[in-house]
Image: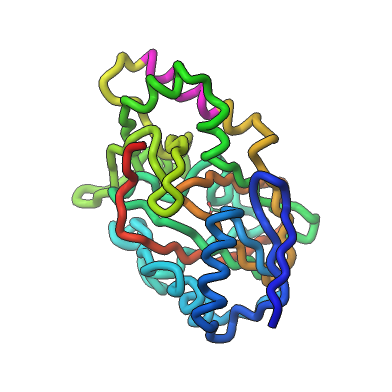
Amino acid sequence: MTIEVSDITPKIGAEISGLDISKPLAPEVISELRELFLRHLVLVFRDQSLSREDHKRFSGYFGELHIHPSHRSGLNKGGDPEIFVIDTPADAPRSNGEAWHSDVSCEAIPPMASLLYVTKVPDNGGGDTMFANMYEAFSELSSDLKALLMRKTAFHDGEIDLRSYGIKLRAGQEYPQASHPIITRHPETGVPLLFVNSSFTSHIEGMPRWESDMLLSGLYDFVAKNARIQCRMKWTPNTLVMWDNRCVQHQAIRDYAGFDRYGERVSILDGKPPEAA
Ligand code: SIN
């Protein structure tokens, strides 16, 4: 089997073909995929027929399977705790992940990657996902701003995201909160990157709230409006996309009201908390 790689943009994303990921993979194939993953940050595998066990086996080649905090906190009962269902029926008022984010950065150790397998694509042709490269976001900042942010940490609060879906915790329920450096260093590539996002980061620690709000909203805008560092992924049925959650943010585009979309996500851990650059 020969793996073929086609860049989506020069900065982020690659389509991988010539590989059936439902089958057990040889160690040299896994190493090649890991290299491609570190280089392109987002890998797209189309026309895959995956059972939940196949999805988990493929994910497990790259890290330990993560359990979403909604399962741990009791907000999401039943089902398979290692599978995070992203089911958007035609009449759903909202879909998951509509704001730019990295997955559950409110965890003390956020997932290193997520692998989303979409089987039902909206019939109106919508439901794309945007991805943005946070190495590039950092590298485009001025040296003065880099120096300031490198000395700071930010607080990531899981309740911000819950509240945006109208979910309130009941007595005894808890959701993760964590403090992370704003500029982290990728544990495998060693490259610095911007690690704050609008779904989970509440404030920069150790500065007046208005200054924190001003800086964070500027950074969020810079990520959202900077097409140079983004790619837009158009799903086809039975596509799995794997992204590096340590250095990529993503946003699900809800432009398909009245149409269904269905996917299941597995996230994986490397056991390493984000480290300051
Ligand atoms: C997410 O993982 O945040 C959702 C992405 C998507 O549904 O495209």
Q: Quadrant location of residue 17?
A: bottom right
Residue 95 screen position, x and y as percent: 58, 50
> In percent of the image, x 47 and y 66: which residue is there?
266
> Which of 272 and 240 lies nearest the eye of the viewer?
272
Q: In the rendering, at what x and y percent does residue 156 appear?
A: 34, 38
What residue sits 46% from the left and 38% below the top? 193
Is 226 or 183 nearer to us in this picture? Answer: 183
Where the C terminus falls, by quadrant?
Answer: top left
Is 79 on the left or on the right of 85, as rendered? left
- Magenta span contains residue 226: no
At a point 65% along the width and 63% down the height, the residue shown is 44
Place of residue 74 in the rendered image (x, y in percent of width and height, measured from the top left): 30, 60
Assess whether residue 217 is covered by the magenta stretch.
yes
Q: Identify whether 131 is placed above or below 138.
A: below
Question: What is the magenta range?
Answer: 210-220
209 left or right, relative to 250: left
Query: Residue 188: x percent and y percent?
Result: 42, 54
